[in-house]
Image (cartoon, rainbow, N blue to C red):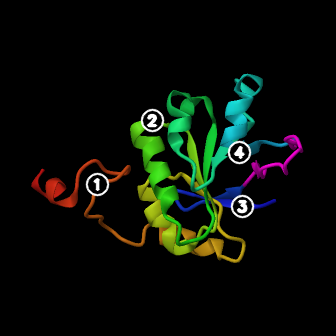
């Protein structure tokens, strides 16, 4: 079973399966275990998935979190896809979900997730990280806390460093 990294540096088994977009003309095929489905398909069949704790959604980097708006907390897990490590739109999606839309449940980074990105993802509000398969999970805890202080405010602290020092 695949593994994921948690924000505290732990490693646990990942019971969620990312379901890709179905090919044109095909319908969505759900696995028997908990599934992350494309956000647009969840919205299209929302009444069918209502109340299911085994269905979450995933955003592609070009999709806007506004499409969920007041529905975000109906989902037990939201994942954000990083199609390549240099695509930073997922960071903005995470901050919007946490800060503007008040998402309180698990937020996961999927796709091309590298060790040196983990602390920045954590500061944007991600709880779990599905590392790229070729990365060493044992190094994740160190990478999540590589810097002892951050200057900017983010989802993990409301005040920038100079304001925290004045307090």
The residue beneath circle 4 is: 38
- Residue mark closest to the camera, 4 vs 3: 4
Image spot of residue 117 (x, y percent):
50, 69
Question: Could you say which quadrant of the image residue 39 lies in?
Answer: top right
Q: Residue at x 65, y 76 (%)?
A: 136
> Rounded to the nearest whole Å, what is the CA distance between mark 1 and mark 2?
18 Å
**Is 17 colored magenta in this rendering?**
yes
Could you tell me which secondary element the residue under label 1 belongs to? loop
Q: Residue at x 41, y 57 (%)?
A: 123
Mark 1 closeness class: few <14, some 14–19, many ≥20 residues within 10 Å:
some
Label 4, label 2: how far apart the Cα atoms are: 19 Å
- Gap in angstroms between the C-alphas marked 4 and 3: 21 Å
The stretch of residues the image draws in magenta is: 14-31
Residue 99 in magenta? no
Sooner in the amino-acid sequence: mark 1 or mark 4: 4
* Disc on res. 101: 2
Nearer to us of marks 4 and 2 is 4
Q: Which residue is mark 1?
A: 153
Find residue 67 and report its image quarter.
top right
Which residue is most to the left? 166
């Amino acid at each position: 079973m695949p593994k994921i990294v948690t924000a505290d540096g732990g490693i646990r088994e990942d019971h969620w399966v990312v379901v890709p977009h179905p090919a044109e003309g095909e319908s969505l095929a759900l696995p028997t275990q908990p599934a992350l489905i494309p956000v647009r398909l969840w919205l299209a069949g929302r009444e069918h998935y209502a109340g299911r704790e085994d269905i979450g959604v995933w955003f592609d980097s070009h999709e806007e979190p506004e499409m969920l708006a007041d529905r975000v907390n109906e989902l037990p897990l939201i994942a954000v896809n990083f199609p390549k490590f240099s695509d930073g739109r997922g960071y903005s999606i995470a901050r919007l979900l946490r800060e503007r839309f008040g998402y309180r449940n698990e937020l996961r980074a999927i796709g091309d997730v590298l060790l040196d990105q983990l602390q920045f993802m954590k500061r944007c509000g991600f709880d779990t990280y599905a590392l790229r398969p070729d990365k060493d999970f044992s190094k994740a805890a160190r990478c999540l806390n590589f810097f002892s202080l951050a200057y900017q405010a983010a989802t993990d602290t409301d005040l920038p460093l100079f304001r925290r020092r004045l307090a």
